[in-house]
């Protein structure tokens, strides 16, 4: 459990974040950037970004300052403010304060809520049992020559080893390309995780974790069970600019990084 938590933090926060209590993404302000421009790129209101970082004057943030971008949660049918607070292990007062809501505020499907400091880590969320849903999600399954394919590459086309801090593969595609689940499993994470776009984590029955970053649209919900080849996302624009990319990583049940190329070869 501890190894899985450490890997998820490293893979998705891009730094060693053992000292960071929040489910957030660190970012260093570069020359020519402002808190306002970062807020636009991260799709977070500047007042929320300021409050999250304890910044009193958004216009006076200097180059080199490290800020943290909060994770965003898209409200689903049947959600309540108290239920979301319990899911992320955060006091309801903090959730209300960051999102400028009152206890009696109404939320509706499609609303975006930002998760305040003091939440569980992505690994802790992944380890929680799926919450009961009011109605099952309809998950489209890709056609296959076999009724139950063992493994499916998440995206067709050119790919190469990720040269950054996240171990795995980078697939190059176009905005809107279909991203498929590499293996059967349960969706444990499905939310915006800047600067990797929208991130999905799927846990196979044997404990292997598959992560898919760089998405524009998520087609599954936490708790959904998917098959190899299920359409789980649509590829999106890279939040940091440049080519449209899918960031694909695998970690085995014992917490070790797995080379996707070797993993697929061994299973074929």
Image (cartoon, rainbow, N blue to C red):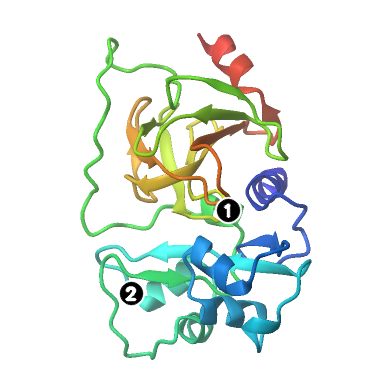
Q: Is residue 237 above or below residue 58?
A: above
Looking at the rendered image, the disc whose residue lies closer to the viewer, 1 or 2, is 1
Numbered disc 2: secondary structure: loop
Image coordinates of residue 54 in percent, x first then y, are 67, 83
Image coordinates of residue 128 in percent, x first then y, are 50, 55
Can residue 117 be seen in the rendering of this structure? no
- Give the residue at mark 2: 80
Q: Compare residues 247 and 181 and report the one nearer the observer.
A: 247
Q: Residue at x 73, y 65 (%)?
A: 20
User: Toward which corner of the image does residue 99 lie, by quadrant?
Assistant: bottom left
Q: Compare residues 254 and 192 and report the one nearer the observer.
A: 192
Image coordinates of residue 79 in percent, x first then y, are 31, 69
Left or right side of 217 for 93: right
- Give the residue at mark 1: 195
Report the Cα–Cα distance between label 1 and label 2: 27 Å
Q: Is residue 107 above or below residue 242?
A: below
Q: Label 2 crowding class (10 Å Cα cut-off): few <14, some 14-19, many 20+?
A: some
Q: Residue at x 42, y 21 (%)?
A: 156
Left or right side of 184 for 71: right
Q: Which mark is residue 26?
A: none
Image coordinates of residue 30 in percent, x first then y, are 72, 61
Extreme residue in the front direction? 32
Q: Residue at x 44, y 19 (%)?
A: 151
Left or right side of 159 for 74: left
Q: Compare residues 79 and 193 and report the one nearer the observer.
A: 193
Can residue 113 be seen in the rendering of this structure? yes
Numbered disc 1: secondary structure: loop
Q: Are marks 1 and 2 in contact (CB under 8 Å)?
A: no
Q: Residue at x 23, y 59 (%)?
A: 134
Q: How many marks?
A: 2
First-in-chain label (1 vs 2): 2
């Amino acid at each position: 459990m501890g190894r899985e938590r450490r890997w998820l933090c490293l893979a998705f926060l891009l730094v060693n974040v053992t000292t960071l209590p929040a489910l957030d993404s660190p970012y260093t302000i570069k020359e020519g950037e402002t808190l306002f421009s970062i807020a636009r790129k991260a799709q977070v209101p500047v007042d929320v970004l300021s409050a999250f970082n304890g910044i009193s004057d958004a216009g006076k943030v200097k180059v080199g300052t490290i800020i943290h971008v909060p994770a965003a949660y898209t409200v689903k049918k049947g959600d309540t403010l108290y239920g979301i607070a319990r899911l992320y292990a955060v006091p309801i007062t903090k959730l209300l304060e960051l999102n400028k809501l009152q206890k009696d505020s109404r939320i509706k499907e499609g609303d975006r809520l930002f998760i305040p400091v003091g939440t569980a880590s992505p690994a802790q969320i992944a380890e929680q049992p799926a919450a009961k849903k009011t109605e099952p999600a309809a998950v489209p399954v890709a056609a296959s020559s076999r009724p139950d394919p063992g493994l499916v590459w998440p995206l067709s086309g050119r790919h190469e080893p990720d040269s950054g801090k996240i171990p795995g593969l980078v697939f190059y595609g176009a905005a809107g390309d279909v991203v498929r689940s590499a293996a059967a499993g349960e969706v444990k994470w499905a939310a915006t995780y800047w600067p990797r776009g929208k991130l999905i984590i799927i846990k196979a029955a044997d404990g292997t974790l598959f992560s898919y970053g760089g998405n524009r649209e998520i087609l599954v919900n936490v708790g959904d069970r998917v098959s190899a080849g299920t359409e789980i996302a649509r590829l999106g624009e890279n939040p940091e600019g440049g080519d449209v990319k899918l960031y694909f990583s695998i970690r085995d049940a014992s917490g070790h990084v797995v080379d996707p190329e070797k993993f697929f070869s061994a299973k074929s």
